[in-house]
Image (spheres, rainbow, N blue to C red):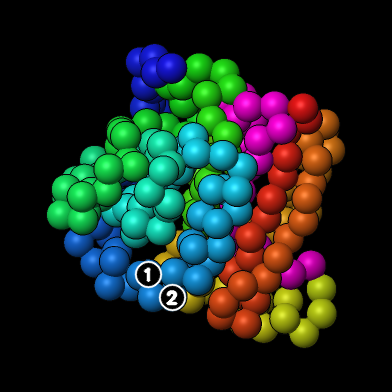
Amino acid sequence: MLSEPQVTGPSTALMRKAYARWAPVYDVVYDKLTEPAARAAVRAAAACGPRILEAGVGTGLSLGYYPAGSFVCGVDLSEDMLKRARAKVRRRRLAHVHGLQVMDVCHLGYADASFDAVVAQFLITLVPDPEAALSEFLRVVRPGGEIILANHFGQTDGPVARVEEIVAPLCTKIGWSSDFKATRIEAWARRNGVEFIGLAPTFPVGFFKILRMRKPA
């Protein structure tokens, strides 16, 4: 199922440096804030079947949310993040986690149709080429399986959109962009014949959303 991973390019090098700085404080900043969205994403993935890839697993905040019978693999660009994820797996004895590897989500080292679902939490707006990452998720998920994204997506109009414009500089500093709209993901889905299931708001007050897509059977 696994081939040689690829981690290349100047953009990925810069991201690894940024993640190395974030790794020691990541859990303190994000744990409680992102937990409801992470749990919702995990529930959606587990409903698709036991074999799940978590792309951008980071420090492994959500690894303990998966059912015991799952077969979860996680990949991340940052070895510093993964060291903390591996420590969680050992400390909590998470036997359902079967591999945590350094890997570029735009060049996944897995065979086609390896997973029932691919989950990416708070990742897709950060990668240099989101469409390339989505295409890799599509490749490694089985026919009928799902791609599940937990993320903040900017509003296209209305009062929320205006508030997002005001707080955009702060969001950018902590890695969230209101410039990235869910419509961009919908457009990718249409071009690739992928079923766009929907976009569901979650805590806090709909700031994070769960986006689901299904690969044609």
Image quarter of residue 22: bottom left
Is residue 129 shown left or right of residue 175? right
Marks 1 and 2: in contact by CB < 8 Å? Answer: yes
Q: Residue at x 63, y 65 (%)?
A: 209
Residue 36: image location, x then y, percent: 50, 71
Image quarter of residue 195: top right
Q: CA distance from mark 2 to mark 1?
A: 5 Å
Q: Can residue 126 be seen from the camera position used here?
A: no
Q: In this figure, which residue is indicated by the disc labeled 2? A: 33
Task: Examine the rendered structure and indicate whether residue 214 appears above or below residue 67.
Answer: above
**Which residue range is magenta in the image?**
134-156
Image quarter of residue 73: top left
Is residue 48 shown left or right of residue 79? right
Q: What label sits on residue 14 in the rendered view? A: none
Q: What label sits on residue 30 in the rendered view? A: 1
Q: Secondary structure at mark 2?
A: helix
Front-lying residue, 76 or 210: 210
Residue 42: image location, x then y, percent: 51, 55
Q: Residue at x 49, y 35 (%)?
A: 51
Residue 90: image location, x then y, percent: 16, 48
| Quadrant in which the C terminus appears | top right
Task: Examine the rendered structure and indicate whether residue 212 appears above or below residue 210.
Answer: above
Q: Amino acid at mark 2?
A: Leu
Is residue 147 shown left or right of residue 15? right
